[in-house]
Amino acid sequence: MADLERTEGSADVPASPGDSASGVIRAAEVPEAWVPVDRRWFGLDRRTVLPALVVLGWALAMSLLVPVAVQLATPPAQRVRAGDTIALAGDVVFVPTPGWTLADGVLAGQESNTGYPDSATVTSGPVTFAVQTGPFTGTAENLLQQLATSSGAGPGQPRSQPTRTTDGNRGVVARVGSETTDGLIATYVIGGTGVEVTVTGPAQLASPPTRQVAAMLASIAQAEEPQ
């Protein structure tokens, strides 16, 4: 029967009642990225919403929690109070000026299991007062020369003048600086321990803490009791 004959290679799509031949939607005509309405949420594919929220939550956690964790892990700078004394290896102590900031070092009485460190630094604004200790058998002048040579200043004794601490420990002090920085270096030898002090700050500072620095230098002493 002619109406039941099919042309070879043809593939008809059954049509719903009322559909015309031009209204038949073939599977090949549906875009691959098309998402049915019942699977959309504010125009987005619901399947992609949850992964996107997970990524967004992770990003927020990293941006908020990581800085907080770093801040908690970093010990806050300690303001020096009246009566504080800083202790260093080699049984050396000095009294920092109240109001300065203890940027590095340990207060006397807070010794760790490994002992006191061999360095300490206090700051006041842009001015830094750093102390380093270590075994030394020479004189304060020898230590100053060694310090100048190791810092790249070259051979020759820096112009220095004698100084003395409140406890009578003799040392030498020399001015150092450049067009942008100003400061001094001082050396002492106390009970077989060499003490190097470096003070630095910007040149042309309006109010240099000269008296405060002099008082801290004068306070350098040997601990009353071996640490």
Image (cartoon, rainbow, N blue to C red):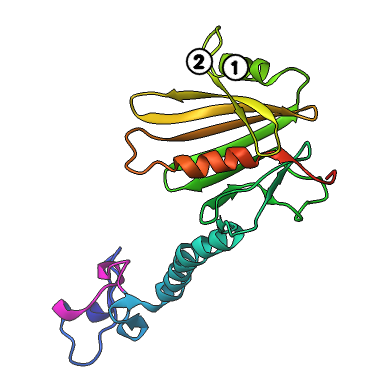
Across and down, in percent, residue 36 comes to: 32, 80
Picture quadrant where residue 223 is located = top right
- Quadrant for the N terminus, please: bottom left
Along the line of sight, the residue nearer the viewer: 162 or 154: 162
16 drawn magenta: no
Which three-letter amino acid code belongs to the residue tagged 2?
Arg
Residue highlighted by disc 2:
159
User: In what element is the residue under mark 2?
Assistant: loop
Range drawn in magenta: 22-34
- Quadrant for the C terminus, please: top right
- Disc 2 versus disc 1: nearer the observer: 2
Q: Which of marks 2 and 1 is nearer the N terminus?
A: 1
Q: Which residue lies furthest to the right in this view?
A: 226
Residue highlighted by disc 1:
150
Mark 1 crowd level (few <14, some 14–19, many ≥20, 10 Å Cα): few
Vertical comparison of 16 with 86: above or below: below
